[in-house]
Amino acid sequence: MNDSFAEMRRRVVEYLVRLGYVKSEKVKKALLSVPREEFVPEPYREYAYDDHPLPIGYGQTISAIHMVAIMTEALDPVPGDKVLEIGTGSGYQAAVLAEIVAKMDPSKRGHVYTIERIPELGEFARRNLDKTGYSDYVTVIVGDGTLGYPEEAPYDRIMITAAAPDIPKPLIEQLREGGRIVAPVGDLYVQRLVIADKVGGVLKRKYGIECVFVPLIGEYGWREE
Ligand code: SAH
């Protein structure tokens, strides 16, 4: 069974390379290393490598694997980076980031801090990261990620994996000069990927593809209904 998951993983990564979503060796290696089937709820394991978002409970989803590839390529993390992710969900994206910043080059131990607002999902992600061997490289924090996590700032890279009305101000403050933030920004129905570098204390923005994420809910996000 494990062999067949490894085979499905290899095939989907090949497909993502062919479509041009996976461009770098580091993203390819990371996607080949993280067992995505361990991050989806049991009934969906066999669909883990279908290129669709899947439900993880509480109305939330694990992003489609091509979206993880696009976001990770856009963020361009390097070994040794300190990364902040907002929207832990299943923990899969955090593991992919950890693979690059903390595992790929053993001489450069970076770290991923990831924030989730739904406590049960924070717990789900911790369990998934634990059983796949990522818990030393990823810290899961339960709280409002729009406020960031000042305790460990500044960050080299910040990724938001929920739809934001705009990039939350605290996150801009907690990004180091020269650092990069990637986030889906727009309304509740459709967003555009923003790739922004902090230059001279302000964000220089570029725009990527259109996408659809679940809402970022918090003080600097959308209001809870
Ligand atoms: N990156 C995840 C998928 C994210 S889905 C993965 O790899 O599986 C978006 C997640 O963001 C949801 O779990 C949702 O609960 C969470 N979220 C929404 N608003 C948030 C906020 N203000 N702070 C932290 N997490 C938030």
Image: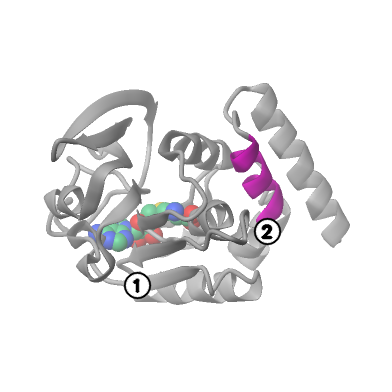
- State yes or no: discs 1 and 2 in contact (Cβ < 8 Å): no
Res 207 → quadrant: top left
Magenta segment range?
25-35
| Residue 77 x, y percent position in the rendering | 46, 45
Res 203 → quadrant: top left
Residue drawn at 73 percent across, 54 percent down = 46
The residue that mark 2 highlights is 37
The residue that mark 1 highlights is 141
In front here: 2 or 32?
A: 32
Q: Of helix, strand and loop, which one carries label 1?
A: strand
Residue drawn at 58 percent across, 60 percent down = 107
* 65 vs 128: above or below: above
216 to the left or right of 89? left
Q: Mark 2 is on which residue type?
A: Glu
In front here: 59 or 66?
A: 66
Q: Mark 1 is on which residue type?
A: Ile
Furthest residue to the front?
107
Residue 189 marker:
none
Question: Dividing the image into 4 quarters, which one contains the N terminus?
Answer: bottom right
Main SS, magenta region, reads: helix
* 133 vs 146: above or below: below
* 187 vs 30: above or below: above
Earlier residue among tags 1 and 2 = 2
Residue drawn at 60 percent across, 60 percent down = 103
In this rendering, the label closer to the viewer, 1 or 2 = 1
Q: Is residue 31 magenta?
A: yes
Q: Of helix, strand and loop, which one carries label 2?
A: helix
